[in-house]
Amino acid sequence: MSKELLHKVHALCPHCLETLPAEVYADAEGKVWMERSCPEHGETVTYVWPDKEHYNWLRSMHTEPTAPKWREYPIEGACCKSCGLCARHTRRGTLVEIEVTRRCNAKCPVCFMSADFPTDGISFEEIEGLVATLAQKVGPETGLQITGGEPTVRRDLPEIVAMARSYGFTGIEINTNGIVIGRSEDYLMRLVEAGITGVYLSFDGIDEAPYESICGRAMLEDKLACIENCRRVGIQVVVCMTIVKGVNDDRVGEVIDFAWKNSDVVIGVALQPAFTSGRFEPSDYAPYTAGDTIFSLPEQTGGLIQVADIMPLGCSDPLCDTGTFLMPNPDDPSTYIPATRGLSREEYLELFDPTSPQGSVLPDILYKKGVNLFHGVSVIIMNYMDAMSATVERMRECSMTVAMKDGRVIPFCSYQMTNTAGERIYEMWGTGPTE
């Protein structure tokens, strides 16, 4: 097979998670692959991207990293196995997650979280200690996402939000399946009064079929009720679509259209191709990458979004986070156009602000260019890494981090990493379950 070497990286053996030298190459059809060989487990080849030219263009949009505020954890081993953050991490975080419970009121088969726990696994006092540490290590200007499990199963979630506010965090988002919020406007109002600034809602389609496949149950009614309650109380929503190949990968355009029609309350769409966490067989690994999502957009949106409209967010490696900002079409305000259309590489790199929050990178650039952004919807495409696709180089630039119970702050993809046997590098919150 014809191979064109594009660059070299350091990848992982999916069996033992050892760091290995790897080569990224394009085949004769222009598809991008990554190849490495483990002395014990042999060769592993991973599909990376659908188009060589697009892959190279994205990599050319790399921005100069801004170092993390705190990265003093001792270097004790290979990358991914001794995160802290340590001195090898090059880029500051723009979002930090706190998992406030292991419990969940749904048991979705594709979820990377283990939800079948009898206790939350962490007390309010431990969470407060963690928030205090985060205020020092990452700074309260960093976006805070409260997640789980399902955070709304905690009765004291409003108190947790208020406590985080007291430590100076101003951007506080609840990552939820929407069941509790959809069924109780009063509960949502308590969260709003405590200080949340947004709801990050899992939303995998506009009919029940994707939920029955992905979640094992009908859930659309609760999702729509959640959005309606957020509309009534005046809190913004980002809908997060987990894309599973063969299940809902052909429904991305529908979700974007839904978000646009509800843009009075839905301010963003996060597209997340499913990644592998837990036990898996490399021979059965069939990735659907962020690149595949990008290249599906012209057809799925009827040509409204083109491949060239999707830009890297600049807050991490260009292959990790991309997106666009949709604004009303002047000729037909009922539909949208990507505000990034025509934005050149030179303008992007010149106007990029390293202090912009993840969801504001592109709007901040466009504002400086003079684009009127009074109304619109952000579209973000997340390219999470697993043991088959991870590279050390991308991991060191991760801007989406997870707060550990022992005070460490580590990259999200490192935290979720498992080998083929389903064994994690990091236990949840860095320790075993709390009684």
Image: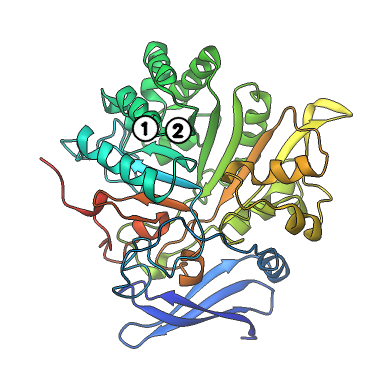
* Residue type, mark 2 in image: Ile
Residue 355 as seen in the image, left or right of residue 370: left
Q: Where is 398 relative to 305, above or below?
A: below
Badge 1 crowding class, 10 Å Cα cut-off, few under 14, some 14 to 19, many 20 or more, is many
Please tell me the numbered disc located at residue 41.
Answer: none
Q: Position of residue 413 (x, y in %)?
A: 41, 58
Residue 61 as seen in the image, left or right of residue 9: right
Query: In this view, which residue lies farthest toward the right?
Result: 331
Please state which of residues 409 and 340 is positioned toward the viewer in this rendering: 409
Decide if residue 171 is in sight here: yes
Please state which of residues 130 and 98 is positioned toward the viewer in this rendering: 130
Q: Secondary structure at mark 1?
A: helix
Where does label 1 land, which residue? 164
Contact between labelled residues 1 and 2, with CB atoms less than 8 Å apart: yes
Q: Where is 97 relative to 226, above or below?
A: below
Instruction: State the separation of the CA atoms marked 2 and 1.
Output: 8 Å
Query: In this view, which residue lies farthest toward the bottom?
Result: 39
Q: Position of residue 290 (x, y in %)?
A: 58, 56
Residue lying at 46% horizontally and 61% vertically, measured from the top left: 385
Residue 278 as seen in the image, left or right of residue 121: right
Quarter location, residue 160 = top left
- Pick whichever of labels 2 and 1 is earlier in the sequence: 1
Quarter location, residue 99 = top left
Where does label 2 land, which residue? 172
Give the position of the N terminus as an image quadrant: bottom right
* Residue type, mark 1 in image: Ala
Q: Where is 412 relative to 167, above or below?
A: below
Which label lies toward us, 2 or 1?
1
Residue lying at 44% horizontally and 19% vertically, measured from the top left: 192
